[in-house]
Amino acid sequence: MEESRNGLSRRQALGAISWAALAVGMTANPALATPKRAGKPSDAAKKAFVDDLIKRMTVDEKIGQLRLISIGPEMPHAKLMDEVAAGRIAGSFNTVIRRDNRPLQEAAVKRSRLKIPLFFAYDVVHGHRTTFPIPLGLASSFDMAVIERMARVSAVEACNDGVDMTFAPMVDIGHDPRWGRTSEGFGEDPYLVSECARASVRGFQGTSPDKPDTIMAAVKHFALYGAVEGGRDYNTVDMSPLRMRQTYLPPYKAAIDAGAGGVMVALNSINGVPATSNTWLLQDLLRKEWGFKGVTVSDHGAITELTRHGVARDNREAAKLSIKAGIDLSMADQVYLAELPGLIASGEIKMAEIDACVREVLGAKYDMGLFADPFLRMGKPEDDPVDVKADSRLNRQPAREIARETIVLLENRNQTLPLKKQGTIALIGPLADSGLDILGSWSAQGVPEQAVTLRAGLEAAIEGKARLVTARGSNVIDDQKVVEYLNFLNWDKPEVVQDPRSIEAMIEEAVSVASQADVVIAAVGELRGMSHESSSRVSIDMPGSQRRLLQALKATGKPLVVVLMNGRPLAIGWEKDNADALLETWYTGTEGGNAIADVLFGDHNPSAKLPISFPRSVGQIPTYYNALRIGRPYTEGKPGNYTSQYFEEAQGPLYPFGFGLSYSRFTLKDLKLSATRLKRGQKLSAEATLTNEGSYEGANVVQLYIADPYASIARPVKELKGFQKVTLKPGESRVVRFEIGEDELKFINGELKEVVENGRFDVQLGLDSHDVLVQSFELV
Ligand code: BGC
């Protein structure tokens, strides 16, 4: 039996459904006599089915349907089977092997009184068997087809393992890179993250979550988890309603509008009220205002944590608050089981309140197609894969193609890149050959030994053409306490294996290896556990002795290509100034080494852009580009005292949102608006000419920003409102056009109403958020 909570562990796994068998071999649950459905179930049929079932349920069975359980020390597999047979479990998460899950499902549909099927959930965040780039990397593609493809392939792999629901997408806006979960999100911008949210849901759920090759998406973490104070995980969130609605809430809404069947509720409090007991959040906003019709699930142990938030006296009160707020499913805690019977008996919780939660859980199972066929995604035992980890179960080609799209070229002096496949290449750095780290955190069933490291990718690319020489050069981190902390995060076995040599000895070896080479590639950054849940940092500097290593490599005088692997923006001022080429690769996943090699050698021309600004130093946080206007802004060219700035270093981010280079040189010129006055209800277009002036075919992302310089409240200095990725041949030009109407101009006003106000708007088109062409029009 394999189970995981945090996705960091390397676990065994599963087997593949034969799709042909799935198509013909679906076995309906006879006890429930649900008719097989063709196409989308009607709401009326679903309601009638669920209502009828609820009428036949005992109180204990209802409470059972509110429990989502993970196998662990207190819940071994055998005990779970008995609990399931007794009708006391709704679903399980982290069990992802068909031969483990089948007996559980059989216990549910053969032994339990009402034969209500279980559902199986898992954190399929950026892959399942195959690991794709981390979400921050996926967002860098600025290509929604890439994200949808990642989610689609992951869903099919997860279905092959009998998974019905994913706890994804994670759409928490990240403004503070100290927060370790920045890596799991899609960056800082509400428009981009909302697009990514929609694309993910489309990919996971396909046409409907009741198909054998689709899974239900439970968007998380509702809400505002990315705004934990100081970037310290699980910390409190205090935020104005305006900022919530303007910046943080839109991505969750986008996922829900795209049809996400579930919502996972955040661990943090919001203005003093934990999300888990937050009636405003879960009832007024989610259900009433947004019309969400799916299932809500608490985060891990969050109900009992209400006592630690200090809003519940004990578990009994915690259970009561959660039910009243609208937490349908309790994840991994026993509080509902222990406390709800007493609360119902005393009348503190009404049966109608319990029924409302049960209705959503059963409704979700219905929507996942499980009443029609509890084994929909599990198939028949004879089709179970013999080797669950077989390489043939991976989707390597999509993984490589997707990963290439997520690599951001930050510097390329003297056209150091692309490299030629000739001569001697030195590959140095503690992340050069780590199959584990390249997967990133939350790598689901990704197997480090199946990951192509950068070393393996380079070797394959230059085989027979050039020589590769290698040295480790340093450890990622030097601080033993930090190593111990990171190893404690992992449940199976320690992840961080330190090289016992002194830093001096390692650097000496690295310099000697580098001096034999024509070019040096340095793979540096963070261990994947450093960008994970519960991995907040006080500094965003290059950790450990890696900077010393880079300085020593620079001193050799060889061209230095720095390949960054990290899950958050780092303060890489030195690397910016000193590397001949600088590539932000994030964590690229199973095919990462091949994808990075494709970029290094020019087999793929990079086109990704940063989905989050890079601060110069930790003290500059936050550096998000779409900040509100202020009275004393720092102005480039005429800074002056008494303007808003940090006086010890340069202003503005090191790299702005939307920034990323190409091997080709692109220009954007001639911004034209189709009109200088826009009447309400009408649209105007903004167009500019993108030209590839370089000698490589390549893509660039044209970004549309809109600024509203005068309104009833202070507005952001600019906001992303559209983007288009355009591929051009050398010498080719194309006119790129955006439509602008009230949708692009509306905002939330001081009364929290969505409005469009007349006046001047600045249209900005650029290849990043900083360097833009500007034209204005008047809304009348
Ligand atoms: C995380 C969630 C995750 C859940 C289940 C929690 O610790 O916050 O994001 O979905 O565990 O693995």
Image: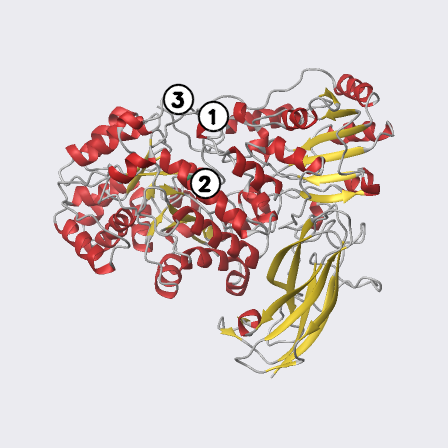
Tag 2: residue type?
Answer: Val
**Residue picked out by circle 1:** 391
Q: Which residue is mark 3?
A: 387
In front: 607, or 295? 607
Ligand 1: does it lie within 8 Å of the C-beta at label 1?
no
The picture quadrant where one finds residue 17 is: top left
Sooner in the amino-acid sequence: mark 2 or mark 3? 2
Badge 1 crowding class, 10 Å Cα cut-off, few under 14, some 14 to 19, many 20 or more, is few
Q: Secondary structure at mark 1?
A: helix
Along the horizontal axis of the image, is 264 left or right of 404? left
Q: Is residue 310 visible?
A: no
Identify the secondary structure beneath mark 2. Answer: helix
Lateral position of residue 667 relative to residue 233, left or right = right
Count residues near mark 2 (Cα–Cα under 10 Å), then give few for <14, some for 14-19, many for 20+: many
In this rendering, would 389 be left or right of 413?
left
* Amino acid bearing label 1: Asp
Is the residue 430 above or below the residue 531 in the image?
above
Residue 460 in the image: state x and y as whole percent: 65, 25
Marks 2 and 3 sit apart, C-alpha to C-alpha, by: 20 Å
Q: Earlier in the sequence, mark 2 or mark 1?
A: 2
Marks 3 and 1, how far apart at CA: 9 Å
Question: What residue is pinned by disc 2?
Answer: 153
Q: Judging from the image, what secondary structure is the residue with disc 3 in? A: loop
In-image side of 416 versus 291 (left or right): right
Within 8 Å of ligand 1, the CB of disc 3? no
| Amino acid at the residue labelled 3 | Asp
How far apart marks 2 and 1 lie (CA) works out to 15 Å
Q: Quadrant of ligand 1?
A: top left
Of the 4 image quadrants, the one containing the C terminus is: bottom right
The residue at the point 49 percent across, 36 percent down is: 442
